Structure formats: C-alpha cells, structure tokens
Image: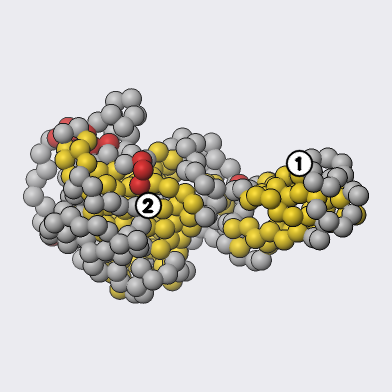
Amino acid sequence: MLRTAAFIVLVAAHGMATAQTKKEKRVGPLVDDAGARCDTNAWQLVFHDEFNGNTLDRSKWITYFPFSSDGSDQCASCRYMGGTNSIFTDDQVTVTNGLLHLGVEATETTWYEVKKEHKASTIRSIGSAEFTYGRFEIRCKLPEGTGLWPAFWMFGGETEIDVFEVCGEKPRWIKGSLHRWGKPKFSNTGKYKGEDTRTDFHDYAVEWEADEIRWYMDGRLIHSRGRFVDERGDPLPGCDRNAGSYHVAPYFPRGTDKVNVIAGNGVSEYNGFCKGPKTPTAWSTESSMLVDWIRVYQRTPQPGLSDLCGTARRIRVTQAGKLHGGSTADVVVEGPHGTLDWNVGAGLTIVSTQEHGITVKASGTSGPTRVIAYCTNDPCTDRPTSFEAQVEVAR
C-alpha cells in the first residue's frame, strides 16, 4: 500500500537495488532454526476503537502520515500516497451513528504543489498503538465505485502488512500482501475471491506471529505465509516445527519492527492499481468505507500495553442518591465494550445517548428502576453480554 515519497527516500538511503531472480524473490538464505511449538495462549485485547461516539478519538488516531521531521502533516507525502488521484483531508473522516465514515469527494485539491482531482480519507494509530505481532481486526463495509481503493494495513520500519486492498470495480477480490521496504524490496501477495464486499459488513483479520501470518475473512482462513519456505519458495508450517535448517522467506516481516494500524479510502489513478476514473464525476452516496470497529489483540501484551479485558467491567450511575421528578443522571459502562442497546424501566426516560452511556430523567413511577445495557460485538467475549444498574426514583 505504501507508495509515497518517503519510501523513495528510504530506498535511496540504502542505495540502488539490484534485479532479483524469481527464486530470490521467494527463497532467502538457509538458517539454523531451533524449532517451535504452536503458541496456544489466548489473544488479549490491547487496543480498540468501537467508534460509538460522534467524533474521532484524537488520542488514538491522526488523519495523515507523519513523515515530516516533527511528526506533523507538513510534508508533501503526509497527505498524499503515490498511485492515487486523491489528497487525504480531515473533512472526509467523520464518526456518526456508531460508525467511522472514510469518504471520498470529486473535488480538486492541492497539497504542497501536489494537485489531485479527489479528496480521500485515512486514519493512522498513534501513541502506544504500535505493535510487534498480534491479531489485527476490522469490521467494515466497503465502498461502491469503480476506481475506489479501500485498504486496512499496518506499517512501521521496513514492514508492511496489508490485511486487505480491494478495488471498487472488483468487489469480490481481496488482496493481502507483505512488503519488506528495505534493500532490496521484497513483496508477496495472495488473492481471494469471495462475497461482494460492498453489500454488507464483514470481519477482516490478520494474525501476525513470529513464524507465520494468517489472513481471515468472517472467521475463515483465506491465506497464510510462513517465515520459512522450502527450496521452491512454498511456505513451511509456522509452528510445531522440528529443529533444522530452513530457508527464510525474504518478504516476511521483521520481528524487530513495530507497526501502526492504518485504514483508508482513496481514488486510484486512471489505469493504476485500480481502474480510477478518467474524468472526475460525483461519487454515489455508497462511496464511503464504513467501519464498525478496529481491534488489536496480542497473546502476551508487549511492554507498555495491557490486557484491557483483564480489568473488571461495570456499569455505574454517576449521581448518588435518589432521582426526583425531572432530574437527570448519567449511566455509563466502564471498560471495553461493543455496541450498547439500552433499556430502562417505567420510572425513567432516556434523554441522550453517548459513546459509553446514557443520560436518564426521572419521569414516572417511583422506586427502584432497572437500567440494562445489552452489548453486541463484545471485544472481550463471544458470549452475549449485558450490564445492569439500579436507579432509585423518588416521588
């Protein structure tokens, strides 16, 4: 996915790459390996955003690539990606009704003398949200439109892992790739033809472990690559492997790199990676990539991260004492949760709904009144979850 000026500078700094043979692209040097058993530890949630509010959480995300010297957006490649006919702009990133909207717009836009015919959108994780190994998940509905280029991927150091790239004109085809942006550059791509990605929400995931990477769609394994390959370049098992000498796959991610999580929706150049429009025309209302949630799990949380589901989750009424007629109270769920569906008893009315809770007003029968939050798509468990509190309503 990364096709920016920043990459060109990176390659130049390492010197000119020499041409690779077909075998060199698939088969690396022979190394001694001590063998490995499969890691069966449970995945633990270390980062997530359910996009349940009405604004983007700026403590987790930026809307550009921080390739400038100070990490700001003040560079040409900070809001432009090579191969696209679009500039990433803040106004195309919105959060409403529990969904992240990554939009496009047929409006000519200039950024650092780079002029393109469309606006586009991206988000990139920041702070401690950079990871070595893990399970990276997104639930989303992809956009409709020839030449659109939605993607979910991770990048850091010399490592790039594309969970998916899809072209709007081929909505059933999913490409999952590995790139090593070093000297020389190595890549490997797998393709999968499945459901129409425009018609409904689907779950996409990659599990990156020390010796294997696996791609999933709606829980089905659709592709995999191992750190080791045979002499033909075919991947060897990633675990339960005996000690021996094995060839390294040259495109496999470096275990020393930390990657950030990136989601975006762009417009391809005409006859580029996708079949971008020759002449810009207004996009349909279905041209946004809709994201329900993004989650990252690790089997053992790396330093600076923790199991977010390991702390007690609870529902809490923020105002103490009884609620008198017409007065209000906030009820919130603390800790990780999915989509919340609220139900209140006869003595209360829901005044407003927020990302983690509701505001209720005393409006009826006095006495103890139940408030229940039913949770779907819970990031901590596959089982149905609910949280219940009691509010005392006075006459």
Return the residue at label 1. Answer: 318
- Give the colouring mode of the picture: secondary structure
Between 297 and 35, the residue placed more toward the observer is 297
Q: What residue sits 87% from the left and 41% below the top? A: 321
Residue at (53, 36) in percent of width and height: 304
Q: For the residue carrying disc 1, how many other residues have a C-alpha within 10 Å: few (<14), some (14-19), or many (20+)? A: few
Q: Is residue 46 above or below residue 375?
A: above
Distance from Cα at disc 1 to Cα at disc 2:
34 Å
**Is 179 left or right of 305, judged from the image as shown?**
left
Across and down, in percent, residue 173 comes to 28, 69
**Most foreground residue, 248 or 324:** 324
Q: Around disc 2, counting alpha carbons within 10 Å, would you say few (fewer than 14), some (14 to 19), or many (20 or more)?
A: many
Circle 1/circle 2 CB separation < 8 Å = no
**Which residue is found at the position 27% from the left and 36% from the top?**
78
- The correct choice, above or below, for 355 with respect to 372 in the image is above
Observer able to see residue 42:
yes
Judged from the image, the secondary structure of the residue bearing numbered disc 1 is loop
Q: Position of residue 110 (x, y in %)?
A: 20, 38
**Where residue 376 sits in the image (x, y, percent)?**
61, 63
Q: Which residue is mark 2?
A: 102
| Residue type, label 1 | Thr
SS at circle 2: strand
Name which residue type carries label 2: Leu
Where residue 61 appears, as percent x and y from the top left, is 44, 40
